[in-house]
């Protein structure tokens, strides 16, 4: 990353902390906190408080058991939950959340907004910039756009190989890949016989940028996973492609070989031409791609120079940092860096109760600083019951899975998804005293703003922190601004009222 990009990210990092999101303020080195007595399982939409951590955490249940009748007329039971720690649950402005590729819900009322189960969107990924957009990457190579507000779907592209023929399967990840933070690049893998193609696709121009073939890499891996690869993903900036090679089929002693190049561990490539740059570590584990406090992109994962710890590896090759060294940080946990609006942190699940059962935000520097987002209270006796906490875009909330101690495993596994965030009742920051409403949002021409206090000043910023418009003579609780001159995208409105400063996201299309 060049100096200009680093400076831009640091400005953004400082600016984003002015958003009204609230975080636990403990900010101390990690200490294990034993799991307290498990509270009663809350009902759908109801909350319990975890008081065992330094700042009380509110835990709200957001899913319910789903009873249905299958094609044979037999009654069935399903416990729908979010997918994984690296698959974003919330949309870009955190007003909506989705459960898999099944349903979209209002993030405040927990009420269903759209049923998308019959639209063939799996696998579905939220846009990182447009809160109304869901991307879908189909096995047949189709790329779809789904718009929540209009409940409409468009096929906007199709992935083919270098000869223009269809792949047997096309996968994002598979399973653990993501779009970059600007919705520009995505790395897909295609099954071409026994070969695996890594396909770099430009989502803005809807065209393939580059195809890199790994001969014989898919081998007998089947439809879902290549034989030699765990996952492939672009980094958050889109500058790098990272491949985590499957440590069950490759190692330093037994690598996958391609044109004389040995592949194993975690490797970094250049996005534009898939040129190999470097190997970060010889052994890949549960991890995610994010930004360190200094603005450099990193892989954060369990396992490093020693097993019981959390480590970050700089994608540009500038070294490895031991973030936390503690037996609680074993291999049975998950990492999420989906907090795109709060760079410099990673969100960690210590899955087993014996390893504290905590959910944490961990600062990506060498201080070992953490924020406690409470315990997950899951028995973790099956894969479905693994908590797999994923952070919200702003990093102020976590979504996780739990059976609230009702294990051992059953068939089907009893499990629900929950939101965890700082308990509003214990927060010293009273953001609810001022209510700001923007509508419509997303907007095309005029946005109306209502406030419970007089608005003294209003500024519009880009997501990189650049002020592009200022309105300093409003002095009213209601105003309307013209945004027709602004390019499509997501912006931040910073409003100064009589008593406070409040920031809101605004999407312009």
Image (spheres, rainbow, N blue to C red):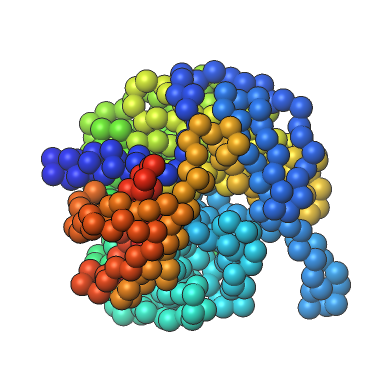
Image spot of residue 228 (x, y percent): 44, 50
Image spot of residue 81 (x, y percent): 65, 55
Residue 305 versus residue 293 in the image, above or below: above
Image spot of residue 354 (x, y percent): 67, 24
Nearer the observer, 465 or 174: 465
Q: Residue at x 69, y 44 (%)?
A: 47
Nearer the observer, 400 or 297: 400
Q: Which residue is drawn at 13% across and 44% down?
A: 4
Image spot of residue 7 (x, y percent): 17, 40
Nearer the observer, 401 or 11: 11
Residue 465 versus residue 284 in the image, above or below: below
**The N terminus: image quadrant:** top left
**The C terminus: image quadrant:** bottom left
Q: In which quarter of the image is residue 27?
A: top left
Q: Residue at x 64, y 67 (%)?
A: 112
User: Is residue 438 visible from the viewing direction of this image?
Assistant: yes
Q: In which quarter of the image is residue 166?
A: bottom left
């Amino acid at each position: 990353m060049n100096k200009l990009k680093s400076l831009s990210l640091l400005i953004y990092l400082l600016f984003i902390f002015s958003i009204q999101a609230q975080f636990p303020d403990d900010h101390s080195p990690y200490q294990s906190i034993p799991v307290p007595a498990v509270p009663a399982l809350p009902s759908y939409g109801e909350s319990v408080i975890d008081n065992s951590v330094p700042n009380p955490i509110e835990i709200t249940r957001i899913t319910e058991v789903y009873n249905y009748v299958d094609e044979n007329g037999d009654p069935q039971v399903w416990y729908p939950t979010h997918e994984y720690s690296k698959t974003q649950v919330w949309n870009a402005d955190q007003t909506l959340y989705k459960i898999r590729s099944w349903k979209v819900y209002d993030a405040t009322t927990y009420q269903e907004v759209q049923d998308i189960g019959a639209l063939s969107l799996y696998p579905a990924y939220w846009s990182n910039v447009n809160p109304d957009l869901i991307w879908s990457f189909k096995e047949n190579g189709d790329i779809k756009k789904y718009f929540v507000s209009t409940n409409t779907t468009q096929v906007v592209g199709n992935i083919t190989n270098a000869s223009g023929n269809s792949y047997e399967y096309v996968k994002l990840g598979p399973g653990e890949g993501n779009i970059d933070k600007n919705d520009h690049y995505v790395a897909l893998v295609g099954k071409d016989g026994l070969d695996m193609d890594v396909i770099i696709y430009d989502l803005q121009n809807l065209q393939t940028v580059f195809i890199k073939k790994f001969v014989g890499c898919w081998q007998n891996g089947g439809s879902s996973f290549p034989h030699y690869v765990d996952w492939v993903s672009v980094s958050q900036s889109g500058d790098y492609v990272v491949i985590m090679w499957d440590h069950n089929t490759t190692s330093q002693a037994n690598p996958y070989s391609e044109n004389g190049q040995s592949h194993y561990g975690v490797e970094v490539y250049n996005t534009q031409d898939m040129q190999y740059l470097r190997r970060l570590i010889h052994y890949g584990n549960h991890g995610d791609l994010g930004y360190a406090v200094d603005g450099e992109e990193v892989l954060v994962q369990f396992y490093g120079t020693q097993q019981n710890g959390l480590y970050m590896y700089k994608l540009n090759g500038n070294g490895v940092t031991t973030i936390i060294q503690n037996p609680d940080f074993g291999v049975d946990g998950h990492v999420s860096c989906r907090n795109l609006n709060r760079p410099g942190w990673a969100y960690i699940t210590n899955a087993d109760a014996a390893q504290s059962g905590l959910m944490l935000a961990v600062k990506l520097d060498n201080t070992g600083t953490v924020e406690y987002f409470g315990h997950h209270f899951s028995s973790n006796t099956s894969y479905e019951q693994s908590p797999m906490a994923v952070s919200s875009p702003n990093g102020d909330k976590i979504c996780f899975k739990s059976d609230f101690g009702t294990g051992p495993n059953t068939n089907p596994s009893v499990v629900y998804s929950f939101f965890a965030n700082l308990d509003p009742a214990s927060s010293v920051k009273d953001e609810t005293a001022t209510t700001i409403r923007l509508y419509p949002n997303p907007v095309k021409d005029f946005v109306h703003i209502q406030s419970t206090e007089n608005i003294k000043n209003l500024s519009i910023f880009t997501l990189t922190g650049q002020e592009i418009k200022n309105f300093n003579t409003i002095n009213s609780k209601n105003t309307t601004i013209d945004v027709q001159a602004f390019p499509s995208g997501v912006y931040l409105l910073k409003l100064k009222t009589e008593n406070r400063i409040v920031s809101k996201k605004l999407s312009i299309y």
